[in-house]
Amino acid sequence: MKLKAKVGLLLFALFLMGLGIVFLGLALGWRLPIDQLLATLSQVKGRWLVGLSGAILIFLGIVVFFDNLKSASTPEGVIQELKLGRVVTTVQALESVVHKAVRQVRGVKEVKPIIRVDAAGLTVILNLVLVPDMKVSEIAQQVQENVKNQVSEIVGVEVLEVRIRVDNIGYDLNARVE
């Protein structure tokens, strides 16, 4: 979370706590806040102060609201803390490992990997084009096992799931039937 959002959220939380205390006091019969507010609103300076306070709260609310609407930043890759420091394996490097693992399976013509990184591990989504005359289920199982094993061995992180979508089975569209 950005600093401005943290500060805005902190101020907003403090305001809500103060408002909660005032409401609790009013419920218990404490009339001073209402009397003070009415006295402040009866003066021009007081109305400006209350209006400015309201505008600041609206601004802080808008900043925090829109900051939270932004999508979470995508992780730069897999981060591992080792004895001598941090090791970051980027998504691009992970894609290279996945490409290598998929190329080892006979029957895959093309691969387009999508890698999702989270705290629990990796999810690898593969869009494949396969060669004709091979069993899709066998190729898919080999690809899944290879990707999981290669990423685990090379990068040292667990692959939670390998999803496969077969986009095409690469029949040659230009071949003629005679």
Image (cartoon, grey):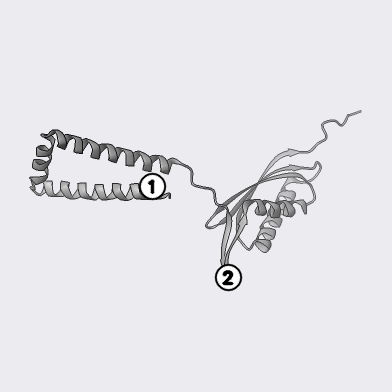
Circle 2 packing at 10 Å, graded few (<14), some (14-19), many (20+), is: few
From what the image shows, is residue 70 above or below residue 86?
Answer: above
Residue 4: mark: 1
Amino acid type, label 2: Leu
Q: Earlier in the sequence, mark 1 or mark 2?
A: 1
Q: How many marks?
A: 2
The residue shown at (8%, 41%) is: 35
From what the image shows, is residue 160 above or below residue 108?
Answer: below
Distance of mark 1 from mark 2, alpha carbons? 33 Å
Front residue of 61/127: it is: 61
Q: Is residue 122 left or right of residue 172?
A: left
- Residue closest to the far bottom: 83
The residue shown at (38%, 47%) is: 4
For the residue labelled by badge 1, is the local secondary structure a helix, a strand or a loop?
helix
Circle 1 packing at 10 Å, graded few (<14), some (14-19), many (20+), is: few
Q: Which residue is mark 2?
A: 84
- Residue closest to the far right: 178
Q: Position of residue 95 (x, y in %)?
A: 67, 51
Amino acid type, label 1: Lys
Front residue of 50/116: it is: 50
Q: Position of residue 9 (x, y in %)?
A: 34, 48
- Residue closest to the far front: 45
For the residue labelled by badge 2, is the local secondary structure a helix, a strand or a loop?
loop
Q: Is residue 78 left or right of residue 6?
A: right
The residue shown at (57%, 71%) is: 83
Q: Quadrant of the C terminus?
A: top right
- Figure quadrant of residue 57: top left
- Figure quadrant of residue 69: top left
Q: Are marks 1 and 2 in contact (CB under 8 Å)?
A: no
Residue 166: mark: none
The residue shown at (15%, 36%) is: 45
